[in-house]
Image (cartoon, rainbow, N blue to C red):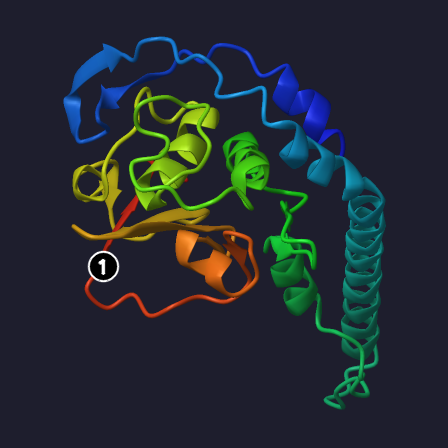
Amino acid sequence: MLAGAVSALALMAVVAVVATSAFGDDSAIRVLRAVASPLPLPPETTQLATNAQAEISAEQAREERAREAAAARKAQQEAEREAAQEVQTIEAPAPTASLDPADADQEIVRAEVLKNGIALPPLESPPEVKSIIEAGNGIARTPYLWGGGHGKWQDKGYDCSGSVSFALASAGLLDRSLTSGELMRWGKPGKGKWVTIWTNEGHVFLQVAGVRFDTSGTRTTGSRWQADMRPTGGFVARHPPGL
């Protein structure tokens, strides 16, 4: 959750991760060196996160109500099926215009991009996914800067691979910035359940819980977070193991 994101980000500890060598060789286990947290963030980005708290709280309440409503509908449907079996009738329950529980579940596991360009992680997402989204929020509106994020974590701006590296490192998945070409060989091949890195020699962006973290998005809304996807032809799909 993004509630309390400012304090959580500011207190992010040094990350030590046991992983395969660049996650590419399962037989060569090594310990990645400790990664100093990219935080604290610039004042303007922390203020942006602070301003989003009220809106985030409302979104959290909405998601909780959606989950409760989905559970109630599922229980009602099960009761109707049991009643139909008892009377041995083939008549199906009357159709309902309410949202199907499966659709509600899908809504819960998808992140949401708010109007202010901040992304709200799903309630049931893993901690790494929440960390990626929270870190992405911190630099979502920073300028595009070629080479930004590669010489240092704290930078005035970030390029595409610098942005992706910053988000992944904040979740303990990287120990240094990688270029888009290097990310073509990082992690596991194919799309992930929660996180997919779409990369080629010239550009890279993230798909996290169904939403896009992409420097090209700033041209449209000023934020790297975008609710819609873009064509992926010519990109290689990679993902962190387990995500």
- Picture quarter containing residue 172? top left
Q: Which amino acid, by three-letter code, is at mark 1?
A: Phe
On the rendered image, what quadrant is the C terminus found in? top left
Where in the figure is residue 194, as x and y percent of width and height? 46, 47
Looking at the image, residue 92 sits to the left or right of residue 29; the answer is right
Q: Nearer the viewer, residue 35 or 160?
A: 160
Where in the figure is residue 158, as x and y percent of width and height? 40, 38
Would you say residue 242 is visible in this rendering? no
Where in the figure is residue 35, as x and y percent of width and height? 40, 13
Q: Nearer the viewer, residue 5 or 196?
A: 5
Q: Residues within 10 Å of mark 1 (few under 14, many from 20)?
A: some
On the rendered image, what quadrant is the N terminus found in? top right
Q: Residue furthest bottom?
A: 91
Residue placed at 32% from the left, 53% from the top? 191
Residue placed at 83% from the left, 44% from the top? 57
Looking at the image, residue 185 sits to the left or right of residue 62; the answer is left
Mark 1 = which residue?
235
| Secondary structure of residue under mark 1 | loop
Would you say residue 104 is visible in this rendering? yes
- Picture quarter containing residue 25? top left
